[in-house]
Amino acid sequence: MTLLSVNDLSVQRGNRTTLNKVSFSAEGGELIGIVGPNGSGKSTLLKAILGLLPHSGMAMVEGKPVSAFSLNERARRMAYLPQNREVAWGVTVKDLVALGRAPYSQAFGASNAADMIKVEAALRSMEVTHLRESSATQISGGELARVLTARALAQETPLLFADEPNAGLDPAHQIHLMSILQRVASEGQTILVSLHDLNLAARWCSRLLVISEGTLVADGAPQETLGEQVLRDVFGIEAFRGEDAQGTVIVPVRRVT
Amino acid sequence: MNLRIPYALLVALLGLAVLCAFVGSLSVGPAQIPFTEGIAALFADDGNPVAVVMQDIRLPRAVLAVLIGISLGLSGAVLQGYLRNPLAEPGLIGVSSTASLGAVIAIYTGLSVAFPLALPLMALMGAAIAGALLNGLAGQRGHTLTLILAGVAISSIATALTSLALNLSPNPFAAMEIVFWMLGSLEDRSMQHVWLALPLMVVGWIMMLSLGRALDALTIGEEAAMTLGVNLKRLSFIAIIGTAASVGAATAVAGAIGFVGLVVPHLMRGLVGHQPSKLLLPSALGGAIMLTVADIGVRIITPQSGLKLGVLTALVGAPFFLWLILAKRRSML
């Protein structure tokens, strides 16, 4: 059964169409990058699939429309890492990551031992175990980004939607994050990640969706989707392209007007 | 403020403190009654003067202080968690001011003289109207900002109408009575007040205590909370109606008492690791302690002049709050 299938998904905001009949499907274990210029509809696509925005068309998970699942059933299938890293209170990092287990806990039940093991594993994989007792409002932006990613990993859903998880991370941690996502995908989880860095997208994702003005214009392996024409027409840039042992290298060099 | 003690111990200690404050409240008053005699008189049914004082005057007062304190502390913690704003308190969403307005109308029209229970009943009606309006205005999509704005608007309208009643008040005594009532007090309350308020308060408490996990999830924002399975519409409904029921009932029997709902969650937050769910019970107990102690203070400081409870909580609460903010700022520098 197809894990995720999206059919003619459209989002209307006022009289503007921010997402226009996007269709694609995804199987287990894919690391799918969503790329496109600012305002092209990357975040809108993720939110519409999650059911966070009013939309037309349909997203189906495990063959069933997302709207047919209860909120809790959705939370056991799709995790979401929003672009804004909001944390209202100075809760400890450990308590923050443990929120990822919320969809599994019984009413009034505290997190059980099995949940805590998963929380520890998520902390470990994002290399933030040393922060576990720190207050989430007193760690650096980069640390918070990793902690919130650990929160989403702890949710252990078949699908993970990450909106710009790399923003504000130093190069080493960007690469680290992408490698974690790749590893998680290799273990069977399917990840949709919106990215601005085309080089990271090309190197780490198994497949890219290119979105321009709300429309899906290309869908396929990075080498095919990020061709010279797409870079020029969609992104308005020319880029240096090369290959190394790990794959494609794309370095934007100038803007074309 | 980041001392962490085990949660169960904290709750047990606070529970014990509520008990002590309650017993303390029972033993304070103009009549000099020895402690053991007073406690024994609570259970006497021979109608002697000591039993009357204990059962009809002190007991309702002490019980109401605990109940109202729980309502204010708990709804403060829920609203701060729901609105993700440390400045939120029950007064912010307009429930207290509409309840006050209901009471003021009862006084203004003379209904409260003809039928004493008209005052709390009209106040409850005011709170119910506020709850329904808030839910209609803000509950549709459960956005917190809309709730704050709607609350401010409702609150302003109620305050304006209260001022109008004062302005047009038929005689100075009516105006005086309105002002005194609005200051908040537990004087001369009966068990009838307790039975009127208790059921609504308990319903409100149960609703609010059920929100713990949803409030925790809301720590990382509304959209992320939804993807953790939180139904924002339901959350908003329960937070609004729970607050309206318990704070409405509190205001109906005691007038508007400020600062407890704002200050108590702040005091407790550091003790529970800032987790909204763990803040609920300690804030409820802390509210009961604070209000009971304040009500003892009112009786000890000025036994004759009748200092109003709401005035004392604001007088003590506001400077203390200022100190808290300064202390917090210092720790952040």
Image (cartoon, grey):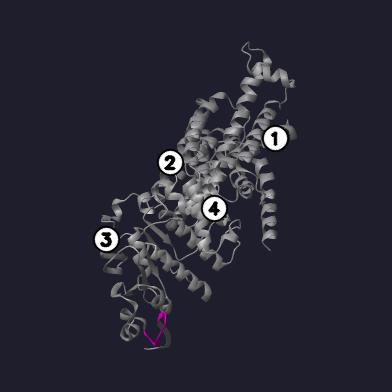
Give the Cα separation between the discs numbered 1 and 4.
41 Å
Subunit bearing disc 4: A
Q: Amino acid at mark 2?
A: Ile
Q: Write down the residue under mark 4.
A: A95
Q: Amino acid at mark 1?
A: Val
Disc 2: CA contacts within 10 A as few (<14), some (14-19) or many (>=20): some
Q: Badges 2 and 3: C-beta atoms under 8 Å apart?
A: no
**Residue A2, which numbered label?**
3
The kind of secondary structure element at disc 2 is helix
Q: Quadrant of the C terminus of chain A?
A: bottom left
On the same chain: label 4 and label 3? yes
**Residue B298, which numbered label?**
1
Subunit bearing disc 3: A
Residue in front for this viewpoint, A155 or A120: A120
Q: Write down the residue under mark 2.
A: B129
**Disc 1 versus disc 3: nearer the observer:** 3
Residue in front for this viewpoint, B17 or B140: B17
Q: Is residue B313 visible?
A: yes
Number of marks drawn:
4
Q: Badges 2 and 4: C-beta atoms under 8 Å apart?
A: no
Q: Residue at x 30, y 75 (%)?
A: A220
The kind of secondary structure element at disc 4 is helix
Q: Badges 1 and 3: C-beta atoms under 8 Å apart?
A: no
On the same chain: label 1 and label 3? no
Rendered location of residue A253, percent (x, y): 43, 88
Give the Cα separation between the discs numbered 2 and 1.
32 Å
On the same chain: label 1 and label 4? no
Q: Amino acid at mark 3?
A: Thr
- Magenta-drawn segment: A236-247
**Residue A111, which numbered label?**
none
